[in-house]
Image (cartoon, rainbow, N blue to C red):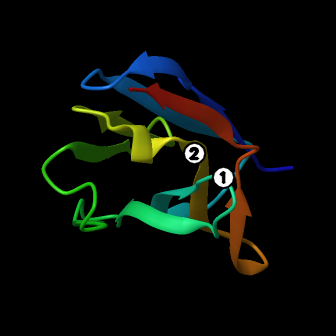
Amino acid sequence: QVQLVESGGGLVQSGGSLRLSCAVSGTVFGIDVMAWYRQPPGKERELVANIDGSGSANYADSVKGRFTISRDSAKKTVDLQMNTLKPEDTAVYYCYTMMRNWRGTFTSWGQGTQVTVSS
């Protein structure tokens, strides 16, 4: 069974940095899109950044220039480097992947990791 295991959340002061990591466990034929979403307190889940198999990445306007998404397809991992963090970045961050197995394409979510930025 495929699972996404996240790590790297925590508490940081405004202006600080954190790095989130997500690893895909289990057997898949391929991984297409890998992404990070976040859900701030009392708000809906939103896309932070995604990256496709060619390495092409997209970012939410609110994080452009501060966050960097990267992936290692061989290791089946995706990271999110977060710099110059702001209190409004406080949220539960979720890893998301679109993958392929013998049944076809399917998606999966991580369990979420809390990021708290203090002012």
Q: 112 or 15, which lies in front?
A: 15
Left-right relation of 47 to 60: right
Mark 2 nearby-residue class (10 Å; few <14, some 14–19, many ≥20): many
Which residue is depicted at the point 32% across and 25% down? 14
Mark 1 = which residue? 41
Q: 99 or 37, which lies in front?
A: 37
Question: Can residue 88 be seen in the rendering of this structure?
Answer: yes
Q: Position of residue 51 (x, y in %)?
A: 34, 62
Residues at discs 1 and 2 in contact (Cβ within 8 Å): yes
24 versus 11 height, above or below: below
Left-right relation of 111 to 65: right
Q: Position of residue 26 (x, y in %)?
A: 74, 43
Q: Position of residue 65 (x, y in %)?
A: 12, 50
Question: Which element is circle 1 on?
Answer: loop
Q: Which mark is residue 5?
A: none
63 versus 23 height, above or below: below
Question: Which element is circle 2 on?
Answer: strand
Which residue is depicted at the point 41% across and 60% down? 48
Please identify the quadrant where the C terminus is shown: top left
Q: What's under tag 1, amino acid-wise? A: Pro
Q: What's under tag 2, amino acid-wise? A: Ala
13 versus 72 height, above or below: above
Left-right relation of 115 to 109: left
Marks 1/2: CA distance? Answer: 6 Å
Q: Quadrant of residue 99?
A: bottom right
Q: Earlier in the sequence, mark 1 or mark 2?
A: 1
Mark 2 = which residue? 91
Q: Quadrant of residue 101?
A: bottom right
| Front position among marks 1 and 2 | 1
Which residue is depicted at the point 34% across and 64% down? 53
Mark 1 nearby-residue class (10 Å; few <14, some 14–19, many ≥20): few
